[in-house]
Image (spheres, helix red, strand yellow):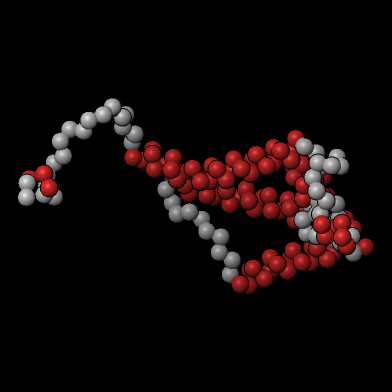
Protein backbone atom coordinates (compact mmCIF):
# COMPACT_ATOMS: atom_id res chain seq x y z
CA UNK A 1 0.00 0.00 0.00
CA UNK A 2 1.49 3.34 -0.97
CA UNK A 3 1.32 6.56 1.04
CA UNK A 4 -1.23 8.24 -1.25
CA UNK A 5 -3.96 5.73 -0.40
CA UNK A 6 -3.81 6.27 3.35
CA UNK A 7 -6.40 8.51 4.99
CA UNK A 8 -3.68 10.88 6.20
CA UNK A 9 -2.33 11.53 2.72
CA UNK A 10 -2.46 15.11 1.48
CA UNK A 11 -3.53 15.42 -2.14
CA UNK A 12 -1.13 17.05 -4.55
CA UNK A 13 -1.82 20.24 -6.51
CA UNK A 14 -4.90 20.08 -8.71
CA UNK A 15 -4.63 20.76 -12.39
CA UNK A 16 -7.12 23.06 -14.07
CA UNK A 17 -8.25 26.68 -14.07
CA UNK A 18 -8.35 28.58 -10.83
CA UNK A 19 -11.90 29.05 -9.51
CA UNK A 20 -12.46 32.09 -7.33
CA UNK A 21 -13.32 31.09 -3.82
CA UNK A 22 -16.89 31.88 -2.72
CA UNK A 23 -17.40 32.20 1.00
CA UNK A 24 -19.32 29.17 2.27
CA UNK A 25 -21.83 31.35 4.13
CA UNK A 26 -22.70 33.33 0.99
CA UNK A 27 -23.01 30.20 -1.15
CA UNK A 28 -25.20 28.42 1.36
CA UNK A 29 -27.37 31.55 1.82
CA UNK A 30 -27.89 31.74 -1.94
CA UNK A 31 -28.78 28.05 -1.96
CA UNK A 32 -31.26 28.54 0.90
CA UNK A 33 -32.88 31.53 -0.83
CA UNK A 34 -33.21 29.76 -4.20
CA UNK A 35 -36.41 27.83 -3.45
CA UNK A 36 -38.45 30.72 -1.99
CA UNK A 37 -37.16 33.00 -4.73
CA UNK A 38 -38.38 30.55 -7.40
CA UNK A 39 -41.81 30.32 -5.77
CA UNK A 40 -42.03 34.12 -5.62
CA UNK A 41 -40.92 34.39 -9.24
CA UNK A 42 -43.61 31.91 -10.32
CA UNK A 43 -46.32 33.69 -8.31
CA UNK A 44 -45.13 37.05 -9.62
CA UNK A 45 -45.19 35.79 -13.21
CA UNK A 46 -48.72 34.42 -12.74
CA UNK A 47 -49.95 37.72 -11.27
CA UNK A 48 -48.18 39.67 -14.03
CA UNK A 49 -49.88 37.55 -16.70
CA UNK A 50 -53.33 37.86 -15.11
CA UNK A 51 -52.68 41.56 -14.58
CA UNK A 52 -51.82 42.01 -18.26
CA UNK A 53 -54.52 39.78 -19.76
CA UNK A 54 -57.87 40.98 -18.45
CA UNK A 55 -60.17 38.10 -17.41
CA UNK A 56 -63.17 40.45 -17.79
CA UNK A 57 -62.70 40.26 -21.57
CA UNK A 58 -64.35 37.12 -22.99
CA UNK A 59 -62.23 34.49 -24.70
CA UNK A 60 -59.00 34.83 -22.72
CA UNK A 61 -59.67 32.22 -20.03
CA UNK A 62 -61.95 29.16 -19.86
CA UNK A 63 -65.25 29.42 -18.00
CA UNK A 64 -65.58 27.53 -14.69
CA UNK A 65 -66.95 24.08 -15.60
CA UNK A 66 -69.18 23.94 -12.50
CA UNK A 67 -70.65 27.33 -13.34
CA UNK A 68 -71.14 26.38 -16.99
CA UNK A 69 -72.80 23.03 -16.26
CA UNK A 70 -74.88 23.89 -13.19
CA UNK A 71 -74.97 27.66 -12.80
CA UNK A 72 -73.52 27.27 -9.30
CA UNK A 73 -70.55 29.40 -8.26
CA UNK A 74 -67.64 27.39 -6.91
CA UNK A 75 -65.34 28.84 -4.21
CA UNK A 76 -62.83 29.80 -6.90
CA UNK A 77 -65.24 31.60 -9.24
CA UNK A 78 -64.10 35.18 -9.65
CA UNK A 79 -60.56 34.31 -8.61
CA UNK A 80 -58.97 35.49 -11.85
CA UNK A 81 -60.92 38.75 -11.78
CA UNK A 82 -59.85 39.11 -8.15
CA UNK A 83 -56.19 38.51 -9.06
CA UNK A 84 -56.45 41.01 -11.92
CA UNK A 85 -57.88 43.69 -9.63
CA UNK A 86 -55.33 42.85 -6.91
CA UNK A 87 -52.47 43.13 -9.43
CA UNK A 88 -53.75 46.60 -10.36
CA UNK A 89 -54.00 47.62 -6.70
CA UNK A 90 -57.81 47.73 -6.58
CA UNK A 91 -58.38 45.91 -3.31
CA UNK A 92 -62.11 46.72 -3.17
CA UNK A 93 -62.73 45.17 -6.60
CA UNK A 94 -60.55 42.20 -5.67
CA UNK A 95 -62.64 41.57 -2.54
CA UNK A 96 -65.81 42.00 -4.58
CA UNK A 97 -64.73 39.35 -7.08
CA UNK A 98 -63.57 36.73 -4.58
CA UNK A 99 -62.95 37.65 -0.95
CA UNK A 100 -61.62 34.20 -0.09
CA UNK A 101 -58.96 34.47 -2.80
CA UNK A 102 -57.78 37.82 -1.42
CA UNK A 103 -57.42 36.26 2.03
CA UNK A 104 -55.40 33.53 0.33
CA UNK A 105 -53.10 36.11 -1.30
CA UNK A 106 -52.31 37.60 2.09
CA UNK A 107 -51.77 34.19 3.71
CA UNK A 108 -49.42 33.27 0.85
CA UNK A 109 -47.55 36.59 1.21
CA UNK A 110 -47.14 36.06 4.96
CA UNK A 111 -45.88 32.52 4.47
CA UNK A 112 -43.41 33.65 1.80
CA UNK A 113 -42.13 36.48 3.99
CA UNK A 114 -41.57 34.03 6.84
CA UNK A 115 -39.81 31.60 4.52
CA UNK A 116 -37.53 34.31 3.08
CA UNK A 117 -36.56 35.63 6.52
CA UNK A 118 -35.81 32.14 7.80
CA UNK A 119 -33.85 31.25 4.67
CA UNK A 120 -31.82 34.46 4.93
CA UNK A 121 -31.03 33.88 8.60
CA UNK A 122 -30.36 30.16 8.18
CA UNK A 123 -33.36 29.01 10.19
CA UNK A 124 -35.56 26.01 9.50
CA UNK A 125 -37.88 25.98 6.51
CA UNK A 126 -41.44 26.75 7.66
CA UNK A 127 -43.79 23.83 7.28
CA UNK A 128 -47.50 23.92 6.74
CA UNK A 129 -48.94 21.44 9.18
CA UNK A 130 -52.68 21.54 9.54
CA UNK A 131 -53.94 19.66 12.52
CA UNK A 132 -57.17 17.82 11.75
CA UNK A 133 -59.32 20.37 13.59
CA UNK A 134 -57.77 23.26 11.65
CA UNK A 135 -58.07 21.40 8.35
CA UNK A 136 -61.77 20.77 9.03
CA UNK A 137 -62.22 24.43 9.98
CA UNK A 138 -60.61 25.64 6.75
CA UNK A 139 -62.76 23.21 4.76
CA UNK A 140 -65.88 24.41 6.59
CA UNK A 141 -65.05 28.06 5.85
CA UNK A 142 -64.59 27.27 2.15
CA UNK A 143 -67.83 25.27 2.08
CA UNK A 144 -69.83 27.99 3.87
CA UNK A 145 -68.34 30.59 1.53
CA UNK A 146 -69.37 28.50 -1.50
CA UNK A 147 -72.91 27.97 -0.22
CA UNK A 148 -73.54 31.52 1.01
CA UNK A 149 -72.34 33.16 -2.20
CA UNK A 150 -74.96 31.15 -4.12
CA UNK A 151 -77.86 32.25 -1.90
CA UNK A 152 -79.84 35.45 -2.36
CA UNK A 153 -78.68 37.03 0.91
CA UNK A 154 -75.03 36.28 0.06
CA UNK A 155 -75.07 37.90 -3.37
CA UNK A 156 -72.48 40.42 -2.16
CA UNK A 157 -69.96 37.53 -2.19
CA UNK A 158 -70.76 36.61 -5.79
CA UNK A 159 -68.45 37.99 -8.50
Q: On screen, 14 above or below 66?
A: above
For the question of whether residue 129 can be seen, the reply is yes
Residue 138 shown left or right of residue 154 in the figure: left
Residue 58 shown left or right of residue 43 in the figure: right
From the viewer's side, name the closer residue of 131 and 56. 56
Image point 48% across, 49% down: which residue?
118
Q: Position of residue 135 (x, y in %)?
A: 64, 68
Residue with the most extreme top position: 17
Image point 80% across, 38% down: which residue?
54
Q: On screen, 73 above or below 29?
A: below
Residue with the most extreme front position: 1
Residue with the most extreme right position: 152
For the question of whether residue 82 can be seen, the reply is no
Image point 64% across, 40% down: which residue?
44
Query: Based on the displayed image, in which of its 4 quarters is residue 21 positioned?
Result: top left
Query: Based on the displayed image, in which of its 4 quarters is residue 145 positioned?
Result: bottom right
Q: Position of residue 64 (x, y in %)?
A: 81, 54
From the viewer's side, name the closer residue of 67 and 147. 67
Count of number-bearing discs:
0
Image point 57% across, 48% down: which residue?
112
Q: Position of residue 92 (x, y in %)?
A: 81, 45
Q: Position of residue 43 (x, y in %)?
A: 63, 44
Residue 9 shown left or right of residue 143 in the figure: left
From the viewer's side, name the closer residue of 21 and 98. 21
Amino acid sequence: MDASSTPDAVPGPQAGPAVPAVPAERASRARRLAAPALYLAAAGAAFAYVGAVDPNEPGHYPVCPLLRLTGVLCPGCGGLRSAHAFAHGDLAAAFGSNALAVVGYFVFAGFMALWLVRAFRGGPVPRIVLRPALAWAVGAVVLVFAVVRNLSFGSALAP
